[in-house]
Amino acid sequence: MGTLKEKLGNIIIPIVTPFDKDTGKVNLDEAANLVNFIIERKYCDSIAVTGTTGEFSTMNIEERIEMYKVVKEAVASRVPLVAGVGAASVQDAVKLSQEAEMLGYDVAMVVAPYYCKPSQEGIYKFFATIAKSISIDVMLYNIPLFTGVNVEPQMVSRLFNEFENVKGIKDEAGINPTQMTEYVLATQGDFTIYNGDDLMILCGLVQGAAGVVSGGAHLIGNKIREMINFFKQGNNEHALKIHQKLDPFFRALTPNGRINPNPVLKAALEIAGHHVGNPRLPLDKATEEEKENIKKHLIRLDVI
């Protein structure tokens, strides 16, 4: 079946879920438009649907399945697809995973259980139940910043060794910058690690990550790809220069103590001509000051 790295490439875009500004409903037409834009620009190697950047936590099951369908149709087999299937209950996560498999998705991405702060054994059983329910590849997703729990390397090794379809993990590396190395050492095989923090792209590559799951790539996927290619060619000096140019943009997505970049990312996409609307509450939309600041970076990086 191959590795996730071979299947998904270096850049996975966790596509935002567009919402209608007036009704708040999922804007499926704009979702299809955004898919075409990021593929035609070659900003990504694969696309993830209803992940954190897709605001899955404020969507119901039916809305998420509709997004699966619309994105699948819009992609038209041009790039591989990852379904974000995380849910508070294992029953919902299993249902979403099975729907994704039936629709022809390549990978199910499962975020660690959240809100309830389970033990590592509970997390193991949660992931194991989902892995057993489908035959497509599974990517674990570790984001302690939002879930309140860490997916420990020893438990990842256990899942990798017990289930053939557990093929990798997305790690929000900004919290524990060296844990990607721990995952590499714990698995010792064809296990793929993706960094989930735009600021940590080079740091992840140095530790053996396949690439990044990048929200910022909606707008600057070409520049991220250039940086990764320079690194792969051994041209660290040029890779570093690009990193230093992109770093202020990534930081501008979470100003004023924000943790979640979606409000400013959606504002940036709107400024660039994509009608993705505002985030759903409880995320508040970007302020005028935040919009002006991110616009300056879009101009500086020749996005607009």
Image (spheres, rainbow, N blue to C red):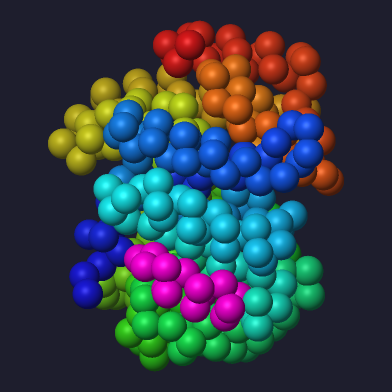
List the single residue furthest toward the left. Answer: 233
Give the residue at x 71% y 27%. Answer: 255
Residue 260 placement: quadrant? top right
23 relative position to 272: left or right: right
Residue 64 visible? The answer is yes
Q: Position of residue 252 (x, y in %)?
A: 62, 24
Quadrant in which the N terminus appears: bottom left
Residue 89 placement: quadrant? bottom right
Tell me where the magenta segment starts and ends, as one range.
Answer: 93-107
Residue 213 visible? The answer is no
Residue 108 included in the magenta stretch of the image? no
Image height of 271 relative to 118, above or below = above
Image height of 212 relative to 231, above or below = below
Give the residue at x 46% y 27%. Answer: 219
Which residue is at the front of the view, 76 or 211? 76
Q: Position of residue 91 (x, y in %)?
A: 65, 83
User: Please, what is the dominant secondary structure of the magenta stretch?
Assistant: helix
Give the residue at x 40% y 46%. Answer: 74
Image height of 116 relative to 105, above or below = below
23 relative position to 291: left or right: right
Residue 97 included in the magenta stretch of the image? yes
Which residue is at the front of the view, 72 or 56? 72
Give the residue at x 78% y 32%. Answer: 22
106 relative position to 95: left or right: left
Q: Position of residue 106 (x, y in %)?
A: 35, 66
Give the total of numbered labels.
0
Which residue is at the front of the view, 137 or 28? 28
Q: Position of residue 59 (x, y in %)?
A: 71, 57
Image height of 9 relative to 181, above or below = above
